[in-house]
Amino acid sequence: MLNNEEGVSGSLSRISLARLGWRRGVEDPVEEEQAPTYLNTTTNCPFLVISTDKLSAQYNGEARHGYDVGAIQGNCAAPVRKLLYYFEIYVKDKGQKGYVSIGFTDQHFKMTRQPGWEPNSFGYHGDDGCLYHGNGKASEPFGPKFTTGDTVGAGINYASQTVFFTKNGKLVGSTPKDVKGPLYPTIGLHSPNEKMDVNFGQRPFVFDIEQLAQEEREKRQTIIEKVSLPLSVSHWIVRSYLLHYGYKETLASFDTASGNTFPPVLPTPQENNSLDIVSYALDQRKILRQLIRNGDVDSAFKKLREWYPQLVQDDMSTICFLLHCQKYIELVMKGMLESAVNYARSELTRFFGVKYLEDLLQDCLALLAYEEPAKSSVGYLLSLAQRELVADAVNAMVLSTNPAVQNPESCLQSSLERLLRQLTACCLERRLLNGGQGEIFCLHKMLHGGKEGSCFTPVCQIH
């Protein structure tokens, strides 16, 4: 049911643009997280001498007891909107006893203790090759010892929720990451003359972290591919999508190509009804889509008045607004600026003050402010995607006139798009269960091969 701002209950007449998949301009990039770049000398680390570039440390204490460790964290917490985070140290000198360690600690960690000796911390120690986690007690033998000349790394795998360690380019092992809060990359030194350099990514890592990331993605993809999906189901989903959007020729080619490949499956009554609904007015919807894709808004208006007058009788409806905007945009694209101004005065001024339409209206009018509007921030309006948005909206409105449709809002998305929305919701929920850590799932980016695309899309995008 639509709210009062969007119109009368059960009608799509004054539906908001957001419900039709509109997003303003090119999607803003996700703000890049700060990542550690140097050692944090603002915290008290009395037993360490830090180099001027804050990337090297040397122990200068006497190492008489367990509370004169020289520990230091990175300048900020490890970023969490990633698949993996990783850093390395190079042991320049193991000193007298080789009490060098690497790991992760929380913001409350005492800088006079080794990583792994305090709650919410992990530490891989060079003198015994053991892993410590939170209580100062060593685990079972974890990995090899490390000493002068070794490069040791520590990382977080947000997908598997583990902390892992490496030595000289090889994976040593991992342990469950049972700490949900921010973790800081941390090193510890605890015997005279111990020296180390830290690499936060300012130079290539010895360990191939990109290969590990690729293996992690392939692992997840393998799990997905093992899920059995009957061919008839995927065939039905694709076919219903083509029907929903009125792609008649593509549908015919798809049916011809599939031929007898798929075993006959008796559709459920619900599936039969769904196909009947999206098959409604297929020829008319195909013609309307083609006219709008070709920029012939006048002919599209004419056909709507002829076939579905109820859709355009309310001159304040969202569909009328979109069509008038598109007509104006087509005039701008043709360089007919005076005609565009006159058209805006006669057809668009009535929409001033309509809250849920004002963003698109402002962007349309702003086209006239630029000598080269295609290169401006509102240049997205001149793309084919804008025409597709209008065509999709008209298509949904026509489907909603089918007497068999009980809920007009069901005409806004195809079955495929509803599945994609469910996928997005599941990925978001999984990330929330991991404390908001891990790669951000962006369906729109994924569907465009990782490239920036138009914000006009019928599918859902979650950041």
Image (tube, grey):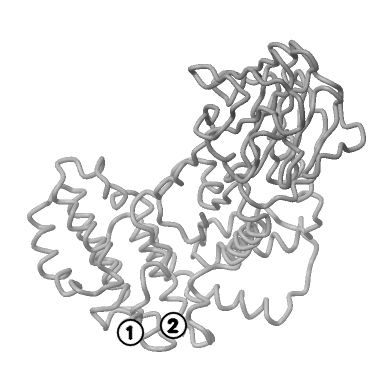
Q: Secondary structure at mark 1?
A: helix
Cα separation, mark 1 vs mark 2, equals: 9 Å
Residue 160 visible (yes or no):
no
* Residue located at (77% from left, 44% from top): 134
Residue 383 x/y as whole percent: 33, 49
**Residue 296 versus residue 367 in the image, above or below:** below
Residue 282 x/y as whole percent: 49, 70
Residue type, label 2: Thr
First-in-chain label (1 vs 2): 1
State the residue position of label 1: 310
Side of 266 relative to 374 (left or right): right
Q: Which residue is at the front of the view, 407 or 149?
A: 149
Q: Quadrant of residue 164?
A: top right
State the residue position of label 2: 401
For the view shown, which residue lies furthest in the right direction?
140
Q: Are marks 1 and 2 in contact (CB under 8 Å)?
A: yes
Residue 288 visible (yes or no):
yes
Residue type, label 1: Gln
Task: Give the crowd class for mark 1: few <14, some 14-19, many >=20 residues within 10 Å.
Answer: few
* Residue located at (44% from left, 64% from top): 286
